[in-house]
C-alpha cells in the first residue's frame, strides 16, 4: 500500500462540517471509571449535608466532588499527585471567585474576573495536558461562585467544605480502585497498544500504523509512570515489546492480528497477565526502562514549555479570555441574570483549533437545548423531596460520563439538567426563568464564543509544526547514528527508538492541530509526510537491531 499520497497546501479558510461532529462514536473502554467515581464522591457529602439539613451548601462540596472525574487514564502512582493537584487548583479557583464576590457586586468586574479565570484555567490545563474533562469543570465552578452572594467571613468555611469533598474524591478516584486492581491502568494501556497493533497487522497502511505507533507510545509512557516495576508490569512491558515489534515490521504478518487481540483480551481481563514468548531484546528493553524510570522528572518542564512566551497555547488562552468576556457582557446587556452560564458555554468551545471549536459549538448548542427540555420534564419530580433531588443529580452525573465519550452533545444532554438542578439545592426558582435564561445564555455564549475563535488567530500553530519537524529530524538522525555504531547496546537502541517515536507522535499532533486552524501560512504537507515515512523506516531498522532473545526462565512471566 502506498504511503506517498500528497495533500495540497491548506487554504486559509476551510469548510466547516455540519453532520460529522454529531455522529456517535464507540464508547470509551473506561467510561464507567469516572462515571462511578463521581457518583460516589458526590453522594457521600450530599447525604451528609442532607442529614445536617444544609443542602444549600452543596455547591461548595460539589466543587470538590467533581475532582473525581480526573486522572482515570493515569497509573495510580501518577494519579495520586494529579488528582491532589486538581483539588488544589479547584480550591484556588473557587477561593479567588468567592473573595471577589464578597468584595464587589459589579457585574462588569465579575464577568472580567470570570473571563480571566477561564483563560488561566484553560492555559494551565493545556500546558499540563490534564485529560478530560479539562478546564471546563474549573470554569463552571469558579464562574458560578462569582455570582453567589458571599461575605469574607464565609469564605474559609466554604473552602473547607470543598477541600473535604476533594479529599473524598481523592480516596474514591485513587485509593479505592488501587486496592481492587493495582495495575488496572497499565493493563488497559497495554491492551489498547495490542489492539492497535492487531489492527495494523490485519490492515497495514499509513493511518493504522500511525494509530498503532501512538498507542504503543502511550503504553510505554503509562508503564514508565507506573512506579516500581512488579512482575505483572514486567509482563506488560514484554507484551508492549511484541506490539511494537509487529507495528515496526517492514511486512506486517496478518497472522499476528489474532494473537495480539487474544493477548489484549486476556490483559484487559482480571486473570493473570498473559505470558508471551521471549521477544527480541526483551532483557535489554526492560533494563532501558529501569534506567529511564530513574531519570524521569516531574511534568514541571512540560508546564514551563506551555507557558513560555512563544507557546502555541497562548493564542488559545487569549481566545478564551476574549470570548468569555464578550459572551458575559452581551448576556448581561441582554438582561440575563446569570451571565456565568454564557461564560461557561464560551469556555467549553475552545479546542486546539478553529475547526474543532466549531465542532464543539454545534455539540454544545444541541446538547444544551435538548438538556433544557429534559430538565423541564424532570423538575416536578425532583422537587418532591430532597432525596429525589439528590437522586436525579446523581443519575444525570452518571449519565453524563456514560454518554459523553459517544459524543460531547450526548453528554451535554445529561450535564445541562444536572447543572440546573444544582440551583435547586439553594431554593426553588421559577422554572420558566431558568429555562429561558439557559437557552439565551447557550445561544449567546456559543455564537459569541465561536466568533472570538475565528477573530483571535493562532498563527503559532504552523510554528509548532516546524519545530516538531526539526525535532523529528534530530531524533531520526540520532537513531541513525546509534544504528551506525559498531555494536549498539539494546538499551541505546531502545532509548533512540522511544525518542523518535515520541517526536513522530508530537509531529502528528501538531500537524492535525494546524490542519484545522485558520488564518495561517500554508504548510507543505510533503515535508510532514516525508518526515513520518523516514521516521517509521528508521524505527523499523532499530527494531531489526535488537539484541538476542532472552532465555525463557528469565522472562519473568506471571
Image (cartoon, rainbow, N blue to C red):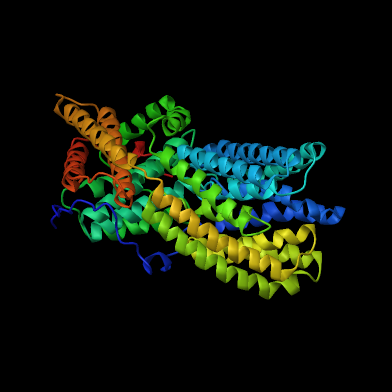
Q: Residue at point 38% right, 44% down?
A: 218
Q: Nearer the viewer, residue 92 or 182?
A: 92
Where 376 falls versus 154 (above or below)?
Answer: below
On the picture, is 273 further left or further right than 199?
Answer: right
Taking 41 as reference, is 251 left or right?
left
Residue 27: percent from left, percent from top: 46, 63
> Taking 155 as reference, is 355 left or right?
left
Q: Nearer the viewer, residue 208 or 277?
A: 208
Q: Position of residue 350 (x, y in %)?
A: 46, 50
Where residue 526 sits in the image (x, y, percent)?
Answer: 16, 46
In the rendered image, the quadrant that contains the N terminus is bottom left
The picture quadrant where one finds residue 195 is: bottom left
Give the image quarter of residue 424. Answer: bottom right
Residue 448: in sight, yes or no? yes
> Nearest the camera: 233 or 21?
21
Residue reaching furthest to the front: 333
Question: In the rendered image, is residue 170 in sight?
Answer: no
Residue at 43% x, 67% y: name it: 22
Q: Nearer the viewer, residue 74 or 339?
A: 339
**Residue 33 % position (x, y):** 56, 55
Number of labelled discs?
0
Is 119 placed above or below 45 here?
above
The quarter of the picture where the C terminus appears is top left
Q: Residue at x 75, y 73 (%)?
A: 381
Amino acid at each position: 500500500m502506498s504511503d506517498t499520497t500528497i495533500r495540497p497546501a491548506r487554504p486559509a479558510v476551510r469548510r466547516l462540517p455540519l453532520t460529522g461532529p454529531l455522529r456517535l462514536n464507540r464508547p470509551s473502554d473506561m467510561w464507567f471509571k469516572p462515571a462511578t467515581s463521581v457518583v460516589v464522591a458526590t453522594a457521600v457529602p450530599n447525604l451528609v449535608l442532607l442529614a445536617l439539613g444544609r443542602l444549600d451548601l452543596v455547591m461548595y462540596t460539589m466543587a470538590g466532588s467533581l475532582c473525581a472525574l480526573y486522572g482515570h487514564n493515569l497509573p495510580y502512582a501518577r494519579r495520586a499527585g494529579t488528582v491532589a493537584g486538581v483539588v488544589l487548583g479547584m480550591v484556588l479557583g473557587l477561593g479567588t471567585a468567592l473573595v471577589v464576590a464578597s468584595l464587589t457586586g459589579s457585574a462588569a468586574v465579575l464577568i472580567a474576573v470570570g473571563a480571566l479565570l477561564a483563560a488561566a484555567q484553560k492555559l494551565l490545563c493545556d500546558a499540563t495536558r490534564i485529560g478530560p474533562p479539562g478546564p471546563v469543570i474549573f470554569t463552571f465552578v469558579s464562574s458560578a461562585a462569582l455570582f453567589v452572594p458571599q461575605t469574607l467571613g464565609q469564605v474559609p468555611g466554604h473552602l473547607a467544605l470543598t477541600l473535604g469533598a476533594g479529599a473524598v474524591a481523592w480516596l474514591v478516584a485513587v485509593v479505592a480502585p488501587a486496592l481492587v486492581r493495582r495495575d488496572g491502568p497499565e493493563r488497559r494501556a497495554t491492551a489498547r497498544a495490542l489492539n492497535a497493533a492487531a489492527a495494523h497487522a490485519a490492515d497495514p497502511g499509513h493511518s493504522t500504523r500511525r494509530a498503532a505507533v501512538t498507542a504503543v507510545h502511550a503504553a510505554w509512557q503509562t508503564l514508565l509512570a507506573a512506579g516500581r516495576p512488579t512482575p505483572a508490569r514486567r509482563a506488560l512491558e514484554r507484551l508492549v515489546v511484541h506490539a511494537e515489534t509487529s507495528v515496526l515490521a517492514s511486512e506486517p504478518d496478518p497472522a499476528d492480528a489474532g494473537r495480539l487481540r487474544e493477548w489484549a483480551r486476556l490483559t484487559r481481563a482480571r486473570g493473570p497477565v498473559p505470558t508471551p514468548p521471549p521477544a527480541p531484546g526483551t532483557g535489554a528493553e526492560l533494563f532501558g526502562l529501569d534506567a529511564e524510570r530513574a531519570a524521569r522528572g516531574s511534568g514541571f518542564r512540560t508546564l514551563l514549555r506551555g507557558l513560555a512566551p512563544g507557546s502555541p497555547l497562548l493564542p488559545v488562552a487569549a481566545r478564551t479570555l476574549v470570548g468569555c468576556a464578550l459572551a458575559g457582557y452581551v448576556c448581561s446587556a441582554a438582561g440575563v441574570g446569570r451571565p456565568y452560564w454564557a461564560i461557561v458555554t464560551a469556555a467549553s468551545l475552545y479546542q486546539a483549533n478553529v475547526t474543532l471549536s466549531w465542532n464543539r459549538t454545534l455539540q454544545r448548542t444541541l446538547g444544551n437545548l435538548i438538556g433544557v427540555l429534559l430538565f423541564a420534564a424532570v423538575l416536578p419530580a425532583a422537587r418532591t423531596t430532597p432525596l429525589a433531588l439528590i437522586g436525579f443529580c446523581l443519575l444525570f452525573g452518571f449519565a453524563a460520563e456514560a454518554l459523553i465519550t459517544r459524543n460531547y452533545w450526548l453528554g451535554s444532554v445529561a450535564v445541562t439538567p444536572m447543572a440546573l438542578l444544582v440551583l435547586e439545592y439553594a431554593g426553588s426558582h421559577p422554572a420558566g426563568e431558568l429555562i429561558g435564561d439557559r437557552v439565551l445564555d447557550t445561544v449567546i455564549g456559543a455564537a459569541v464564543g465561536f466568533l472570538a475563535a475565528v477573530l483571535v488567530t493562532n498563527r503559532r500553530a504552523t510554528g509548532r509544526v516546524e519545530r516538531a519537524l526539526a525535532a523529528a529530524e534530530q531524533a531520526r538522525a540520532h537513531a541513525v547514528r546509534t544504528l551506525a555504531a559498531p555494536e549498539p547496546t539494546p538499551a541505546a537502541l531502545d532509548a533512540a527508538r522511544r525518542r523518535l517515536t515520541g517526536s513522530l507522535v508530537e509531529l502528528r499532533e501538531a500537524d492535525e492541530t494546524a490542519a484545522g486552524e485558520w488564518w495561517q501560512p500554508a504548510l507543505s504537507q510533503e515535508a510532514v509526510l516525508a518526515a513520518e515515512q523516514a521516521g517509521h523506516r528508521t524505527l523499523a531498522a532499530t527494531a531489526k537491531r535488537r539484541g538476542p532473545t532472552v532465555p525463557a526462565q528469565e522472562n519473568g512471566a506471571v
